[in-house]
Image (tube, rainbow, N blue to C red):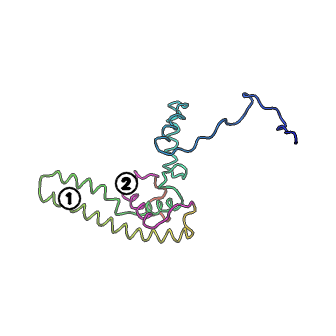
């Protein structure tokens, strides 16, 4: 039998030991668990530090930095779709104002005016849908040309999902879009 050999150094005292002790916690399985953990971590920060971090994260998200945007906005393909959508005038952009105007028209007691309001809204919706279908096809071709090997980040680039993403972005008023538009109207992308 061979004698056992030690590790070649003395066992360190507890106050000399470095590194993490114990197992690393697994990633959270639910949203509730993630919120609970972030609150525990956040207890070490002051209110002002938390506010500062939140402001910084929001600014980076509004700028479109990939690490800070929502999962639906991640990747170079989605950034390209945002830029193309923001660079053109979209019929879908009038939907929100027309819907508000149509609702206000319904408050007027004149029957002919009450018929016109919803009709104008219906026409605006149909025009926006037709425009978005045409734009979605153009967008799919442009994405296929720009990214022939698919999304470099590995996210989905299905034409329908990109068209729906562009339509949702186009429905919002430009100032309300998140991330903010990086290109102006009429700019070449």
Disc 2 or 1, which lies upstream in sequence? 1
182 to the left or right of 91: right
Quarter of the image where the N terminus is located:
top right
In the rendered structure, which segment of residues is drawn in magenta? 153-179
- Report which residue position mark 1 lands on: 117
Q: CA distance from mark 2 to mark 1?
A: 21 Å
Whole-percent x, y for residue 67 in the image: 55, 50
Specify the label residue 12 is tagged with: none
Label 2 residue SS: loop
Q: Residues within 10 Å of mark 2 (few under 14, many from 20)?
A: some
Magenta span contains residue 164? yes
Q: Residue drawn 55% across and 31% down?
A: 44
25 to the left or right of 169: right
Question: Image height check: is 169 above or below 10?
Answer: below
Question: Image height check: is 33 above or below 84?
Answer: above
156 to the left or right of 111: right
Foreground pick, 4 / 109: 4
Whole-percent x, y for residue 172 in the image: 37, 55
Question: Image height check: is 58 above or below 73?
Answer: above
Magenta span contains residue 147? no
Contact flag, marks 2 and 1 (Cβ < 8 Å): no
Q: Residue drawn 52% across and 48% down?
A: 68
Q: Quadrant of residue 119?
A: bottom left
Q: Residues within 10 Å of mark 1 (few under 14, many from 20)?
A: some
Q: Residue drawn 72% across and 34% down?
A: 18
Label 1 residue SS: helix
Specify the label residue 173 is tagged with: 2
Foreground pick, 86 / 75: 75
């Amino acid at each position: 039998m061979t004698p056992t050999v030690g590790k070649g150094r003395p066992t360190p005292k507890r106050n000399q030991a470095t590194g993490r002790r114990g197992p690393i916690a697994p990633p959270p399985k639910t949203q509730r668990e993630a919120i609970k953990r972030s609150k525990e971590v956040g207890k070490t920060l002051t209110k002002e530090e938390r506010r500062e971090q939140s402001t910084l994260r929001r600014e980076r998200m509004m700028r479109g930095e990939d690490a800070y945007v929502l999962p639906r906005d991640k990747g170079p393909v989605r950034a390209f779709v945002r830029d193309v959508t923001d660079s053109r005038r979209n019929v879908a952009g009038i939907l929100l104002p027309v819907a508000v105007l149509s609702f206000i028209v319904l408050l007027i007691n004149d029957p002919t005016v009450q018929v016109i309001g919803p009709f104008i809204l219906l026409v605006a919706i149909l025009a926006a849908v037709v425009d978005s279908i045409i734009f979605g096809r153009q967008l799919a071709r442009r994405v296929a040309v720009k990214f022939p090997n698919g999304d470099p980040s590995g996210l989905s680039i299905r034409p329908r999902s990109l068209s729906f993403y562009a339509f949702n972005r186009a429905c919002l008023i430009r100032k309300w879009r998140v991330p903010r538009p990086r290109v102006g109207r009429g700019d070449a992308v």
